[in-house]
Image: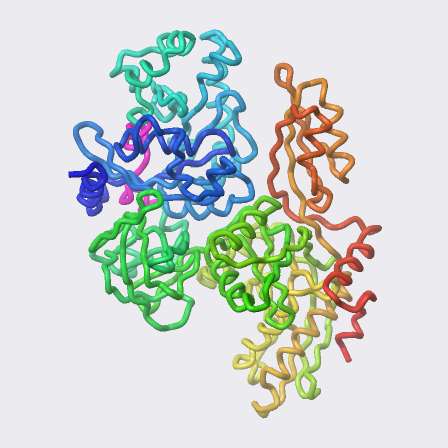
Amino acid sequence: MSRGKKMVDRVTELMDKPELIRNIGIVAHIDHGKTTLSDNLLSGAGMISEELAGRQLFMDSDEEEQARGITIDASNVSMVHEYDNKEYLINMIDTPGHVDFGGDVTRAMRAVDGAVVVVDAVEGTMPQTETVLRQALKEQVVPVLFINKVDRLINELKVDEQEMQIRLGKVIDKVNKLIKGMNEDMYNAGWKLDAAKGTVAFGSALYNWAISVPFMKTSGISFKDVYQMCRAGEMKALAKKSPLHAVLLDMVVRHLPNPIEAQKRRINVIWHGDKESPEGKAMYSCDPNGPITMMVTDISFDANAGEIATGRLFSGTMRRGAEVYIIGAAQRANRVQQAGIFMGPSRIQVEELPAGNIAAVTGLKDAIVGSTVTSLREMTPFESLKHYSEPVMTVAVEAKNMKDLPKLVEVLRQVAKEDPTLNVTINEETGEHLIAGMGELHLEIITGRIKRDKGVEIITSPPIVVYRETPTGIATNVEGKSPNRHNRFYVDLEPLPEKIVEMIKAGEISMNQPMLERRDALIAAGFDKDEAKSVKDIYGTNMFIDMTKGIQYLNETMELVLDGVHEALDGGPLADEKVQNMKIRLVDVKLHEDAIHRGPAQVIPASRSAIKAGLLMAGDSLLEPMQKISITVPTDQMGAATSQLQGRRGQVFDITSEGDTVTVVGKAPVAELFGFAGDVRSATEGRAMWSSEFAGFEIVPSGMVKDVVMAIRKRKGLKEQLPRPEDYLA
């Protein structure tokens, strides 16, 4: 029997034993060694040859990933590990470390129950380490730590044995400090990382060895032995005595929860439905005989099988031919064509897949990333995925040949489905299409794939920064009239309190939760009681509240009112950019009694114009995206690094030094950061290491607003004069 076939049989035998399953994600800052680590775990499990491990980059199956040497897509693999004479099924997701692909990490964290946090022993924790750890804790995913590249400490930095232990201790302390700061309750409840307990391992993914305190006891290898063998260059011998896959996967099996334990704790965080309902009970107990409930965390396309929806199956058993519903999509059933699991780039089909596994399913035409898939017609959906970053850059894309236009539209829809952190706007009339992404690299990869994988020749514009609009003051009793003058809407607008905005972003307030739960959360955050119970809609970080009482026909018209509000929020009056952080109160409505006079053509323009005029009256201003930047340089280059930041409207808010290096931390507007990589390299003679992460939106300095607005209006072909409220109130 071939090695591959044997592995598939072992995997399928364990699928229906949730107590023997571990769903894990490998997370880290870019270049800290996740993919090399994943390769070595696979080689230990007998899935790829030892010689190629760490160089094959099995999980980076995309040619772009191979060429750039970075992980772009999260990829899944299932393998078997023996521990204490029992076999365990490990479903693993290798995630990207680059900040532009953080959305993949968020999605992967919904599918897994445990995370191996990889940290470079030399670089220590970096900004993205913090971000991925925060994403894991938010999803109630238990962390263990692997400190990688220990060989570099010994052979490159030439530290002695004592110094090595001090440095490794510092890394553990720093990660623990992050966990405690993010969630003290979990930290105290046993999530604190402790080398003595075995929740920390040390090693070198490249040279395939690792060590942990429990493994030292069974193997008889000490830190002293590790140090001496590294100094002597005896890496292969060390890898034989203390193999990476054995140490790491032992730690995973011992310290990370199985789906039954994990779901008892996780379900109430990711799902707000009734615990006593059939689906509630089935998910809390990971019951394979309950209704099917699955959350889609990834969508990919296969030339032969079409769309593949991958996600975590929380209850029920997925079978070929099963009828399932996508909650929130069309009310028609989708039929499962194939169910299977991923083994890296290849997909293995199975007859049935029980709860607790990560399933790859074809036939779910209506699913998008974040969809709730269930065999029930009605079900409270899972909490939506909250991405930490937002699209901050846009490129305009058009087909090189007009005949490719229909194909380009189809490809863009596919791309938007595959990567929900992208924002795709399709303009059928002008033939210009916009793709908004997380940064220059993200957009470069996506447009490259359209040309290479999807076979459409395209022309792209240089990247443009994405702005937002927001009110800075208050507008009251703004009247929006319908074109026939028979319907009138009166609204008050003001900025939404910062605290509420943060709660919406964190998913603590949403339209998915029960009304009473939402009302209580808002009141606790300082909201007025009447307003808290009258929230009709949350759109982005904007809130629509219906404060009217007993107005005839309003209920049947409300959906059209909200359509108009959404249109206004999708493109504000100043620069046709999205609006955020606004509170809208509907205070009065006058409606025509005849339904024919209050249809979509009347109501939508009326509510839209009330919002747009009101925004201008409330001091509509622009918000620009900011990036937090961390630059590590030798001490003598500190001045060059800080001046690079300050020369780009940046602020420096922290400078720390360690040994002969300095880390400068600051933030700057995305608009000023084009070409930053090249400039910072040349200014510091190529000795700077830097990383960035999204730092939210901030108001554009008042002196610049007019110029920025006019430039955007000109680019979008809007009238080249600033709009006034009267333009919308005619």
- The colouring scheme, among rainbow, by chain, secondary structure or one colour, is rainbow
Residue at point 58%, 59% (across, down): 540
Nearest the camera: 661 or 262?
661
Residue 90 horizontal side relative to residue 576, left or right? left
Residue at point 65%, 75% (across, down): 607
- The quadrant of the picture occupied by the C terminus is bottom right
Residue 630 occupies quadrant: top right
Residue 605 occupies quadrant: bottom right
- The quadrant of the picture occupied by the N terminus is top left
| Dominant secondary structure of the residues highlighted in magenta in the image | helix
Residue 5 horizontal side relative to residue 638, left or right? left
Nearest the camera: 272 or 355?
355
Residue at point 73%, 66% (across, down): 573
Depicted 18 relative to depicted 336: above or below: above
x, y percent for residue 658: 62, 18
x, y percent for residue 568: 66, 69
x, y percent for residue 119: 47, 27
State which region is magenta.
248-265
Answer yes or no: is residue 228 visible.
yes
Residue at point 54%, 76% (across, down): 559
Marker count (numbered):
0
Is residue 591 within the magenta segment?
no
Instruction: Pick out the residue farthest to the left.
Output: 1
Answer yes or no: is residue 144 visible.
no
x, y percent for residue 643: 77, 30
